[in-house]
Image (spheres, coloured by chain):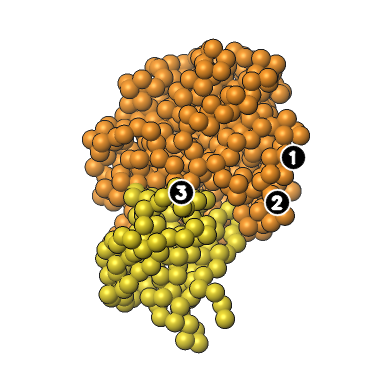
Chain colours: A orange, B yellow
């Protein structure tokens, strides 16, 4: 099996510098894969599988690998669109950020404000965003604008270990730390007027982007199943080059159990983002007296999905740091986007820019309906902290018109813009390759970092 | 003389390289390294204890499971580990009592959450009478 990398001359240089190429090649050795082992232009070294990788497995003969999804199951992004413009918000931006920072738990070790029993947590794992809406966080319209409609139906809370539940129970409704964020942005450029109009985006419009995942629950599910897969792999005669590629047949007991637990963790993340979305709306209402923040879409970029593709038929698509990019007329996209295609949300690094793209038929033909997910790191955390102070970073961003609230100073410097690849360069590659097309570019004015 | 643990660079995450005169000491210092990533230079008292009993496939897997347990105690219970006493540690199992305290916002500063312990460049080896345990963590 071959590997295929989408990149520019500049980006391939970065990709060649770490172990990404070896990891793409290693994935190509796994049993029952279909097509090619793919890498997106933001690809960088991961654990076993590269981040920014896509691999599809035949449902009958192929494998599932927990490492092919990643530790942060359903790490994803949602975009909310307001009826406000930049000039409506600027004078009260600090009030808004302070309110968001107060209302949405973020940062290392932060617990949620919802006191869940284990029985209630099981409901979250089964119903995902539907649980959140039933409990007063948002509406049916939100559900209609989420990947999987905010709930993976094959979830089974019994497949999730007690440890994973113990880690996650206290963390529902929290942003997390690391590269998770909430950004208040404005739409700076429109590339596709028709698509922007259908998605409800216009120039100067204030939007909010939320980037977060399944927290400790998802991380533990992946950890648990990496162990299960390592232990049971020999029973199926599977050997791997890198133990982090541990995998089992999709149809095996362990494979099915993983997919059910993964779906449950994905539902936790959908509920998580739905709750933070609700509090974001409340913050806007408190500061601006309005609450109309419409959900444009919610995407996941760490997941394994059973899908039908022209190559391979029914396959399990592993997307690790890659986003689904379905075209127009696909039955799985929201009805009001049917004539345009699925929104693809690409977050940039702190203080740079983000994009909305749209999925294409070409993605369906070439990449199992997939595209990039973001910028990818180019500098280690240690290097990012060296010669940088949080105060200087906050000042520099302020000079660019970006206000920052961070839960930790070192967290801020580790996430500074230079530590990441150029998201515009990444997006240009996927646009030029035709696997997702630019619709709008947004620039942040306020950032909440965990 | 090299320190009990060091934090290693990685393109997107962090590594911990811990040392000890015994494998148990290296495992304890790896746990301390993990705590240093989570809680910086916060001083952790040894007021409470937890029991840990694990089996593993091999020595490296044991290190991952040990640190996964330390991480679990923090993430699920906000228990910070300061010290450990091993009743038994061999290539595929360990029994230990860990000592530490619950996170106290007035005394501890939490700096970074760790998602998981990985198998990247995993190593548990002895050279020149020094045990080294190396592991990378997903931030």
Query: Residue A129's mark?
Result: none
Say which of B87 and B92 sits in front.
B87
Please report the residue visible at 54 percent of the width from the left and 46 percent of the height from the top.
A178
In the picture of the structure, the residue carrying the numbered disc 3 is B106
Say which of A87 and A39 sits in front.
A87
Evaluate whether residue B77 shows in this view: yes
Q: Please report whichever mark, 2 or 1, sits nearer to the chain's N-terminal start.
A: 2
Measure how far apart labels 2 and 3 are at the Cα level: 27 Å
State whether residue B94 is above or below residue A270: below
Looking at the image, the residue that sits furthest to the front is B106
Please report the residue visible at 63 percent of the width from the left and 35 percent of the height from the top.
A404
Q: Please check whether the numbered discs 2 and 3 fall on a single chain.
A: no
| Chain letter behind tag 1 | A
Q: Residues within 10 Å of mark 1 (few under 14, many from 20)?
A: some
Q: Give the number of callouts.
A: 3
Evaluate whether residue A345 shows in this view: no
- Find residue A127 and report its horizontal and vertical position in percent: 31, 29
In the picture of the structure, the residue carrying the numbered disc 2 is A388
Instruction: State left or right for residue A355 relative to residue A166.
Output: right
Q: Residues within 10 Å of mark 2 (few under 14, many from 20)?
A: some
**Circle nearer the viewer, 2 or 3:** 3
Please report the residue visible at 48 percent of the width from the left and 75 percent of the height from the top.
B19
**Helix, strand or loop at disc 3?**
loop
In the picture of the structure, the residue carrying the numbered disc 1 is A396
Measure how far apart labels 2 and 1 are at the Cα level: 11 Å
Instruction: State left or right for residue B83 relative to residue A311.
Output: left
């Amino acid at each position: 099996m071959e590997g295929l990398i989408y990149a520019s001359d500049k980006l391939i240089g970065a990709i060649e510098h770490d172990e990404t190429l070896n990891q793409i090649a290693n994935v190509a050795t796994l049993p029952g894969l279909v097509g090619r082992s793919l890498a997106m232009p933001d690809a960088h070294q991961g654990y076993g599988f590269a981040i920014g990788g896509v691999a599809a497995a035949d449902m009958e003969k192929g494998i599932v690998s927990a490492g092919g999804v990643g530790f942060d199951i359903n790490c994803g992004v949602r975009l909310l669109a307001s009826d406000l413009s930049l000039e409506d918000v600027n004078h009260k931006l600090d009030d808004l950020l302070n309110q968001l920072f107060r209302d949405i738990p973020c940062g290392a070790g932060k617990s949620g404000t919802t006191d869940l029993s284990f029985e209630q947590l099981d409901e979250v794992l089964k119903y995902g965003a539907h649980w959140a809406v039933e409990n007063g966080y948002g509406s049916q319209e939100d559900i209609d604008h989420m990947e999987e409609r905010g709930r993976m139906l094959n979830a089974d809370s019994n497949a999730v270990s007690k440890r994973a539940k113990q880690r996650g129970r206290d963390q529902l409704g929290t942003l997390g730390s690391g590269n998770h964020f909430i950004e208040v942005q404005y739409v700076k450029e429109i590339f596709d007027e028709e698509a922007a109009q259908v998605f409800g985006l216009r120039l100067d419009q204030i939007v909010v982007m939320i980037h977060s995942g399944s927290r400790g629950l998802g991380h533990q599910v992946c950890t648990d199943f990496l162990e299960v897969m390592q232990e049971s792999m020999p029973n199926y005669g599977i050997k791997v080059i890198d133990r982090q590629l541990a995998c089992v047949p999709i149809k095996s007991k362990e494979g099915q159990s993983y997919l059910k637990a993964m779906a449950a963790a994905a539902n936790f993340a959908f509920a998580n983002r739905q709750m933070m979305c609700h509090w974001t709306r409340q913050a806007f209402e408190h500061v601006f007296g309005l609450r109309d923040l419409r959900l444009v879409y919610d995407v996941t970029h760490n997941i394994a999905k059973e899908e039908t593709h022209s190559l391979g038929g029914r396959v399990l698509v592993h997307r690790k740091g890659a986003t689904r990019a379905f075209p127009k007329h696909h039955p799985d996209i929201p009805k009001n986007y049917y004539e345009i295609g699925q929104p693809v949300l690409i977050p940039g690094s702190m203080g740079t820019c983000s994009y909305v793209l749209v999925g294409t038929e070409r993605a369906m033909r070439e990449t199992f309906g997939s595209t990039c997910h973001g910028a990818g790191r180019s500098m280690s955390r240690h290097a990012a902290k060296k010669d940088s102070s949080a105060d200087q970073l906050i000042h520099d961003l302020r000079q660019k018109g970006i206000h920052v609230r961070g839960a930790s100073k070192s967290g801020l410097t580790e996430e500074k813009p230079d530590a990441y690849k150029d998201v515009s360069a990444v997006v240009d590659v996927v646009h030029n390759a035709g696997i997702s097309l630019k619709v709008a570019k947004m620039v942040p004015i306020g950032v909440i970092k965990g | 003389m090299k320190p009990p643990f060091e934090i290693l660079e990685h393109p997107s995450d962090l590594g911990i390289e811990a040392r000890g005169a015994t494998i148990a000491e290296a495992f304890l210092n790896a746990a301390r390294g993990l705590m240093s990533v989570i809680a910086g230079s916060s001083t952790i008292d040894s007021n409470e204890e937890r029991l840990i009993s694990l089996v593993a496939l091999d020595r490296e897997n044991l290190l991952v499971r040990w640190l996964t347990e330390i991480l679990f105690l923090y993430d699920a219970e906000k228990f910070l580990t300061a010290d450990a006493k091993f009743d038994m540690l061999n290539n595929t199992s360990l029994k230990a009592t860990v000592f530490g305290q619950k996170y106290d916002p007035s005394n501890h500063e939490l700096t970074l959450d760790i998602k998981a312990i990985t198998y990247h460049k995993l190593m548990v080896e002895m050279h020149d009478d020094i045990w080294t345990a190396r592991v990378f963590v997903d931030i």
